[in-house]
Amino acid sequence: MDGATIEDGEMKLFERKQAIYKSLDEKYLVHGQRYKGQQYSQIYFARLHHLRNLLHSLVTKWKPHLEVITVLGLEESRECVIVGTIYKHMKLKPCILDEYSKERTAVPLVKPHNFLHPDDQLILEDEIGRVKLRGSLLNPTDFVTGIGLALHGMKTIEGDFLVQDLLEAGFPPQTKLPRLGEDKYVVFVSGLNVGSNIFNPLQFQLFVDHVTGHLGGDNEQKMTSQIVRVVIAGNSVIIPHSVLNGQALTPEDQRKLTEPIKEVDILLTQLAAAVPLDIMPGPTDPANSFLPQQPLHRCLFPGASSYNTFFSCTNPHQFELDGFQFLGTSGQNIDDLDKYSSAQTKLEFVERTLRWRHLAPTAPNTLVVNVYTHVIRAAQVELK
């Protein structure tokens, strides 16, 4: 039973719908790997290999009359197709060496929300060379480093490549969705920010009461009973920066550190008692900072973790419900795209990741990832 209303002296009960759940997070879990000095080059090689094979198969239908050649094989004024990875040279892109040199000056380092500049340039790279791209078809503000593209054009006398047409990996072929005999819902929520000034306990308690079936009339409770899962997608907790200063914690600092987590556990316990619940780590949560973020430790949530409906998941998080697959992140990949490119809405960035068939195209250039857990390759495989 999930909700109940009294009608004509009788209590009307609503049974919560069920869905078959399967976690697909195994590919994002880190199992004791240690850093041994390797760089990120193997991620870019793996990305180029996967996307090049895909784009080559599409080029035969897109430009069947043109030859696909390497960057070093370009000849002046000869039309052709080249396939490679975009590198975006950005004038305002932050550099750690600049930060180190400027920290000694009295002038504070400017940290703009977006690092775009009119002089930004696009370059295409493959395994053996690179060439600067020209042409009105390519607007640097729409692209970021790490995208795989096939370009139709020719080499100019200046040595640049004049782009006449472009081909993205495009939306992957979609599998036929299974049929459901009844409506079922998955609730996604993020940014609880417990511990910050913007957190509203009353507002979230109303949300908990609604999901657990303690609010509303028959229509609302009937719809609530069709919620088969709640996913909390990151930023559940805000830890004050003053506490994380590397110094020994005072009793007051320990209280500031633990109280937000205890409050989240109380709220999650109410949810887990009524509905299956997934929680993902985000940028502000007590988890590793690089992607893929590992599950928040269950000891942080002693109340919620006592229920078998509570699942601590990775970020990215991938799962299956009644044959429907879900794949998402806590937003770091989209926020990073917003820093190094432009769009009307953030939803447009999400659409671009589908067109590019890449969940986190800016990693590892500006989005930090674990060098061993090929989250980039995993995302490519899933978006094929």
Image (cartoon, rainbow, N blue to C red):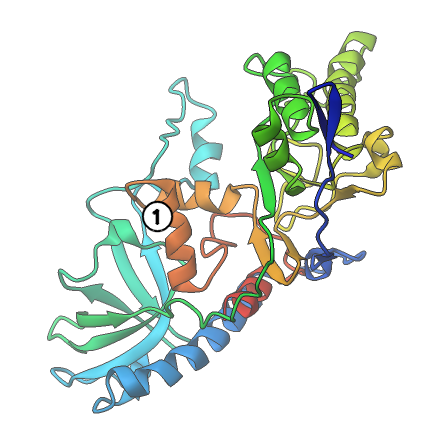
Q: Position of residue 299 (x, y in %)?
A: 86, 34
Q: Nearer the viewer, residue 126 or 80?
A: 80
> In the image, what residue type sits under mark 1?
Glu
User: Residue at left 44%, top 70%?
Assistant: 172
Q: How many numbered dots are placed on residues in this image? A: 1
Q: Is residue 165 left or right of residue 33?
A: left
User: Residue at left 56%, top 47%?
Assistant: 329
Task: Report crowding for label 1: few under 14, some 14 to 19, many 20 or more residues within 10 A (C-alpha).
Answer: few
User: Residue at left 17%, top 64%?
Assistant: 134
Q: Position of residue 328 (x, y in %)?
A: 56, 50
Q: Nearer the viewer, residue 50 or 78?
A: 50
Q: Position of residue 128 (x, y in %)?
A: 40, 78
| SS state under label 1 | helix
User: Residue at left 47%, top 48%?
Assistant: 366
Q: Which residue is mark 1?
A: 348
Q: Quadrant of residue 261?
A: top right
Q: Answer above or below: position of 83 versus 43.
A: below
Residue lying at the far front in this picture: please name it. Answer: 8
Q: Is residue 219 left or right of residue 156?
A: right
Q: Answer above or below: position of 264 versus 289.
A: above
Q: Is residue 114 left or right of residue 53?
A: left
Evaluate whether residue 241 shows in this view.
no
Q: Nearer the viewer, residue 73 or 347?
A: 347
Evaluate whether residue 48 shows in this view.
yes
Q: Is residue 42 left or right of residue 294?
A: left
- Which quadrant holds the N terminus? top right
Q: Position of residue 200 (x, y in %)?
A: 59, 14
Q: Nearer the viewer, residue 177 or 288?
A: 177
